[in-house]
Amino acid sequence: MFLASKHCKNQSRTMISFSCSASPKLTSILALLLILVTMIQVNGQSPPGFISIDCGWENSSAYLNGALNIVYSSDVWFVEGGQNHQISPEFIEDAFNGQQKTLRSFPGGSRNCYTLPSTAGKKYLLRAMFTYGNYDRLNKTLDGSLFLFGLHIGVNFWEAVNLTNWDPSVTVFKEVLTVAPSNSVSFCLINFGSGIPFISSLELRPLQDTMYPFVNTSVSVSYFKRCRFGNITDPITRYPVDDYDRFWESCTFTSYPFINLNTNKNVGSLPGNNDFNVPSAILQQTSTLDTNYSRFSINVASAYNKDALSLQLLPIFHFTEINGSNPNRRFDIFSTGEVLFQGFSPSPLQVDSMYKSGQFLQKGDTFFTLDKTPGSSLPPLINAFEVYSLVQMENLTTDFNDVYNIKQIKTHYNLARTSWNGDPCWPREYSWEGLTCDYSKSNQNPRIVTLNLSTSGLGGRFAILLMNMMSLENFNLSNNKIDGPIPYYILQRVQAGLLDLR
């Protein structure tokens, strides 16, 4: 099913332009299509593994969104802190789905994190959506001041959300493909001091292990553009057409010399090619040119808050021949004048997914040209197209056992420190208050070596879990009301000066 809404856009406002060229005997023609990214309404059956969160939803019970046919739950189980809000009444009716009517803002703390259950080593698509909707009645997106906050995936910077001069009614989205480092995926909003971070909805979708083979524990990729071609009337296609709930934007040509083709026949994958699992319905339509024309270009331009100089892009082209007359079609594929693939011929009713594995382009602004080879009878075609930007996963999370134990201690003493969310040690500037971490071994996970909980209003029995933190060299629980028996081996540590219980 294909549904659309004019009220949702990709944050980058990435622009794609298409041009085509005639054969030398004809006069050159330029056809330009400028697409500002639009977004979506959603429809689908919620399959196993989908986590769908309505941020700011105050009812603790999950509910079925009838328009989407996907079960959503409150974010209260996934995050600490923050404040619930509803967007301004004048934007309620036009909100593109129910999840954009409420949000959670984070006026306190420099980092606030959601923790989503996952399977360690599994690949996921994570999508965050933001609808300001003038919830605070301050018109912050249109008051002329900078409205910018950051996003982290785990302990690594992912991208910024820039809502400066942004229409408050419009929903924007961010999407990343990543590998879960443990039994949870952490997503954090970072306060840059230029506007209060907030979020409207958060979605986690499992991917097959064979998909996107360039994504691994050290490399994630952020959505830059994902297009389907042909005669598509709706701006976005997603689940249930796509089992993995990817958003496919419609890049439709309606003017000469472009021609849109389609077939009702199933389009399969080449043997052993499970890298992307593009839905057959996406591949059953394609765009090509009148036979008097030989080439067209796709111009991918960064815009708004995208820094073209720092971006590294990976394009993926999806082709299949749906012309049933066994045509002679062969073309070259260029990136800003440099050859990517030479003499390519699409397979009949089987998808060829063309990309340079692990080779990210060092330019955020680039164009791709599909050019008919001299011996080809027909011009190039394209069915679908994806572009991702590189997200380096360079920082290591805190040692798993240390994380587990410090979180158990947090629960034991009911600690409510603002900074105690997300990873305890990384990034360093957001490490938890009262902890000292050891970063000396650059290729190993940092360890917690000191813990200072003095004068923290703690009560109850001594947390034996402290003794499970084998890297802990010193901890301070002085000036609290710790009672109950203290094991002898702990008293030995007190006598040795490693533990302060005064």
Image: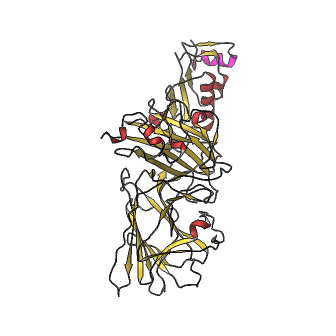
Magenta span has 373?
no
Is residue 334 or residue 246 the one in the foreground?
A: 246
| Quadrant of the rendered image containing residue 164 | top left
Position of residue 51 relative to residue 435, above or below, is below
Is residue 488 or residue 24 the one in the foreground?
A: 24
Q: In which quarter of the image is the N terminus?
A: bottom right
Here the colouring is secondary structure
Question: Is 182 left, or right, of 365 in this rendering?
Answer: right
Residue 248 is situated, as x and y percent measured from the top left of the image, at: 52, 60
Q: At x 44% / y 86%, what residue is drawn?
A: 374
Residue 483 is situated, as x and y percent measured from the top left of the image, at: 65, 12
Q: At x 34% / y 77%, what residue is drawn?
A: 29
Magenta span has 489?
yes
Visible in this render: residue 156? no
Position of residue 296 relative to residue 227, above or below, is below
Is residue 397 or residue 80 the one in the foreground?
A: 80
Residue 418 is situated, as x and y percent measured from the top left of the image, at: 49, 27
Position of residue 124 relative to residue 407, above or below, is below
Q: In which quarter of the image is the C terminus?
A: top right
| Quadrant of the rendered image containing residue 186 | top right
Q: What stretch is highlighted in magenta?
A: 485-498
Question: Is 96 left, or right, of 463 in this rendering?
Answer: left
Residue 101 is situated, as x and y percent measured from the top left of the image, at: 50, 40
